[in-house]
Image: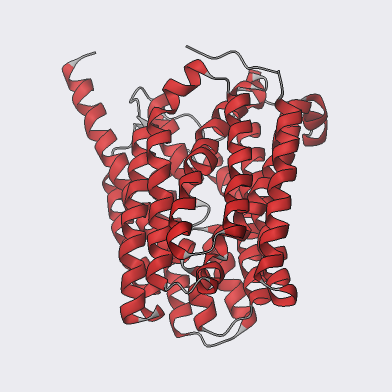
Amino acid sequence: MPKTKMSLTKKVNLQFAAIQGSFWISFLPLGGFAVVLLQSKNFTDSEIGIILAMQSIASIIAQPLISTFAGKHPRIPLKNIVAAMLLFGAAISSVFFFLPHLFLPAVLIFMVIGMTEYSAPAFINAIAMQLTNAGVKINYGVSRGIGSLSFALAGVLLGKLVDISGTDMIIPFSVILVLITCVLIWRMYAPPYKEQPAVDIASPAQIPQTNIWTFLRRNKVYTGFCIASSFIFACHACVSNFLPNITDSLGGSITDQGIIRGISAAFELPIMIIYSILARRISSHKLLTISAFSFFLKSLATMFVPSISLLFLVQAFQMPAFGLYTPAAVHFSDHSVTDADRVRAQAISMVAGIGIGNVFGNLGGGFILDKWGLPSMLFVATILGFIGFIIMFAALYEKPVKVIE
């Protein structure tokens, strides 16, 4: 490889790693401390569940619309679209700083956050794919790992700051980091227009010829994976989003919540970095089954944990759970369907897991908390996690995918 190309590749990887780090720090305040922020404005657990569920629904709806816009306007650099999304989200979220306990405006604000900041990771990933297709290879595992590490360190810091200064600093912290992220995105190298493939648009020879229901019926193993993902992410949403209720029940503080989120994110880092090595030795079918079982075990352990200090240790399950699921799901979706369906498979798996799973986890978790309390919510979450594991095991058992060397 020519020296100039090596220099460009190194520069772009550093830029992309910086964006990942900055973005996930900016995502933390409203992604990790949303429940704390809403509770500070006296929203009930049921109201919080509805608000977060509507945020997830908005993200599900927005992503294909934004993707279609990007595909129809390839002359607009994708990085500019992402930066515009983040700026709009930051502007709207800043309104929440001045908002009292008003349910409908809160729903609308968090829906915008879902459409922008929650949708942004998919398009930041698309930037990496776009660069790779243009001949600038991105080391995604390392860059995403830096994002997780940044999230981890920021979680500890933000938890302490909120304990000291109160929840009023959550929104300003988020807005400042979003602005920094936008500057980094604007400064990032973008391949020339002629070298850019259209985003999320297959070549004419590879355009899917079937509707989504025919596609799901034809790919039964993949469909089973999607159903299982919905259950395990409903479980994950209950445990992760309502972490403040869990820590409060154990006598913990907001600082403890930040530490827990930091530990959890830090455990994702090693598995993301070594995933390419694991994938050469173990099929994505088996890795996803291990991941589903780990989601169940984490929820089960959380239900019975007697103290904050042991809850810290429970976060080790995040490594084989969410940390393993993220790259394994991308790998599985890419290799379990035909070339023409690859883009669609990635989108559907995101909607089924993080989308639908979060919607039902947030709605159900908030309602159960208000009606029957935390133990009942954790019990239901654990049952959902177990069902997800059983479906994943049954759907993927002894159906190995050929590993691409």
Q: Position of residue 313 (x, y in %)?
A: 44, 52
Q: Identify which residue is drawn at 74% across, 40% down.
A: 227
285 on left or right of 178: right
The quadrant of the rendering that contains the N terminus is top left
Front position in the image: 180 or 277: 277
Res 62 quadrant in image: bottom right
Q: Residue furthest bottom?
A: 100
Q: Front-most of 239 and 96?
A: 239
Q: Position of residue 389 (x, y in %)?
A: 69, 39
Q: Is residue 100 above or below residue 52?
A: below
x 67%, y 22%: residue? 337
In the rendered structure, the answer to whether residue 275 lies left or right of residue 109 reads left
* Relative horizontal placement of residue 211, taking residue 75 as reference (left or right): right
Q: Is residue 281 above or below residue 92?
A: above
Specify whether 40 is left or right of 217: left
Looking at the image, which residue is at 71% across and 40% down? 228
Q: Position of residue 201 (x, y in %)?
A: 58, 32
Q: Nearer the viewer, residue 173 or 95?
A: 173
Res 35 seen here: yes
Of 43 and 301, the residue lying toward us: 301
Total number of numbered discs in the rendering: 0
* Residue at x 44%, y 31% (from the top left corner): 129
